[in-house]
Image (tube, rainbow, N blue to C red):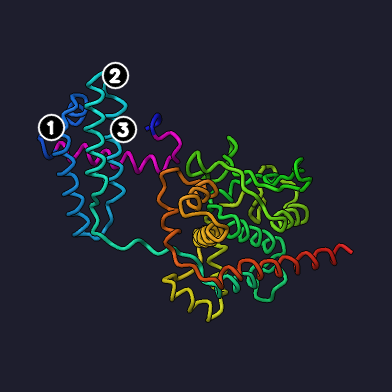
Amino acid sequence: MDVLKGSLEDSTKRGHLAAVARLYDATERQLGSDCLDRLLADLDFDAIENVLVGFLAQLRNEAAMGGADRSSTWYSALTFVTDVLRHGGPAAGSRAGDLETRLLRLERLYSQLSPAPTTAPPPIRALPPAVIEDLYAIFDPHSDRNPFKSEALRWRNLLIFMLLLRLGLRRGEAAILAANAIKDDTDPATGNTVIWIDVEGVPDEDPRYEQPGLKTVLARRQLPVPQEIAFLSDAYVQNYRGRTHHPFLLMSQKRLPISLRAMNEVFETATAALSDPARRSLEKQGLSGVSCHDLRHTCAVVRMRRYQDAGDDVTRAMERLRLFFGWSPKSDMPRLYARAYFETSLAQVWDEKFDRFVNALRRSVDGGDE
């Protein structure tokens, strides 16, 4: 696991290992002995396929009786088998060619199978335009509808909202941003100022009980940042964050690094403040509230539309999505966004409402300084 899946988070590794343990148990029940290691070492493909078929049948029965989707267990087990065979088998000669042929057959045949009944892909949870407009009003620090008590919390939560919506950050990625994560420099070719944000791993010491982090090594990336986001970050850091004993950008009321639970609570509170029309729009979308990940979905759908409108074909647009959102080269997530229906009105809200909103905030802050 450390060699082949070393870039994954510990929780994801535990899920893979639990699936592998279930495959070993299933093998012992089917064949009467704990012999999966021997089958793999001997490259006994016929016996291995029989074990996989039996394990798939077991998972399908569980899915049928309990309604649970066992797809991730199946794919983890299948990946384990093919990885061990590929990395532990002979490295050269005709035997290697035969091994690769059998492995390709295994992958092509069994990767298409699933223990769950065939269902339509889950809908992309892009928030409706009415909800986006409502959230701008709710997170406005000067709005009467803002439900957060202190001025510091209002500006912090506005920054969280913008980072998740405009940059599509995961909740854990936002929680580990450094106070100086947003940087700028002059482009020598154009003379323009370039602003970006570093999304990278956490320091060695993190006092949080539930430690946030990057989902995979590919999540470490640099993203272009609009000037408005840089402005909001500067306003929060200079006026409300103050000095702390930790390097993280976002902090709690006790001046500690913000917890993942606290970030969830921000959007639970915002959901409670939604207007009735916005709530009805959410219900039509099949949503009961606004979550951190809903904002990431919304950002991805908008960017997919933008890439296509700019002339990128679907393949190029999906590749750009993978880079921006930190997905693996084989991730199917961009394919879901490519199929997602996108309302033009959401693009208008995305641009126009945001620009008006930030300009009003800028005038308010500038006027306060005077």
Q: Quadrant of the C terminus?
A: bottom right
For label 2, the residue is 92
Residue position marked by numbered label 3 in the rendering: 83
* Amino acid type assigned to the residue bearing label 1 in the image: Ser
Q: Residue at x 71, y 60 (%)?
A: 152
Give the secondary structure at mark 2: loop
Residue 351: image location, x then y, percent: 64, 66
In the image as oriented, which residue stretches furthest toward the right? 370
Q: CA distance from mark 2 to mark 1?
A: 32 Å
Vertical relation: 330 (above or below) 141: above
Residue 153 inside the magenta-drawn segment: no
| Dot in front, 1 or 3 | 3
**Residue 231 vs residue 113, the one in the foreground:** 113
Measured Cα–Cα span from mark 3 to mark 2: 17 Å
Q: Which residues are magenta?
A: 5-28
- Under tag 1, what secondary structure? loop
Quadrant in the rendering for residue 344:
bottom right
Residue furthest toward the left? Answer: 32
- Residue at the image position 78 percent from the left and 64 percent from the top: 362
Whichever of callouts 3 and 2 sits on the residue coming sooner in the sequence is 3
The disc, 1 or 3, on the residue closer to the chain's N-terminal end is 1
Q: Residue furthest bottom?
A: 276
- Residue placed furthest toward the top: 93
Q: Nearer the viewer, mark 3 or mark 2?
A: 2
Residue 33 numbered tag:
1
In the rendered image, residue 323, in percent from the top left (x then y), is placed at 53, 46
Q: Residue shown at 72%/47% (left/top)?
A: 194
* Magenta residues, dominant SS class: helix
Give me the residue at 75% from left, 57% from top.
235
Q: Is residue 314 above or below residue 178?
A: below
